[in-house]
Image: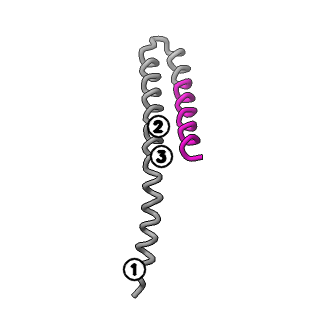
Amino acid sequence: MKPVFPCLLCLLLVAGHLDALVPELKAYKECMSSCFRQYNECTNDCKASSVMIANFSMKSVCRRLHQTCTRSCHKRHFN
C-alpha cells in the first residue's frame, strides 16, 4: 500500500494555491464580462445603423475593440 500522507499534503498545497487564485480568477471573469458587455453594446449600435457599409465596418471595429479588451484582461491577470 502507498502512503496516504504525501498525497494529502500535496492536495493541501494545491488547495492553498487554488485559494490564492480564486480572487484572481474572479477579477479575470469580471474583466472578461465587461469586455463582452462592451462588445454587445457595440454590436447593438451596429444593428441600429441603417447603412450596410457603416454597419460592416463598425462590426470589425467592435471585434478589434473586443480583442484588445480581452488581451488586456489576460495580461493584467495572468502576466
In the image, taking residue 66 as reference, residue 9 lies left or right, namely: left
Q: Is residue 6 above or below residue 62?
A: below
- Main SS of the magenta part reads helix
Q: Residues under labels 3 and 1: Cα distance?
A: 31 Å
Q: Residue at x 54, y 43 (%)?
A: 77
Find residue 53 and report its horizontal and vertical position in percent: 54, 15
Kindly identify which numbered label has been placed on residue 57.
none
Q: Please, what is the three-letter code of the amino acid marked with disc 1?
A: Val
Q: Which of pointers 1 and 2 lies earlier in the amino acid sequence?
A: 1
Report the magenta residues as a range: 60-79
Kindly identify which numbered label has been placed on residue 24.
3
Q: Quadrant of residue 37?
A: top left
Which of these two is toward me, 40 or 3? 3
Q: Residue at x 49, y 11 (%)?
A: 51
Which of these two is toward me, 73 or 21? 21
In front: mark 1 or mark 2? 1
Kindly identify which numbered label has been placed on residue 32.
2
What SS does tag 3 mark?
A: helix
Q: Please, what is the three-letter code of the amino acid marked with disc 2?
A: Met
Identity of the residue furthest to the top in this view: 50
Q: Which of pointers 3 and 2 lies earlier in the amino acid sequence?
A: 3
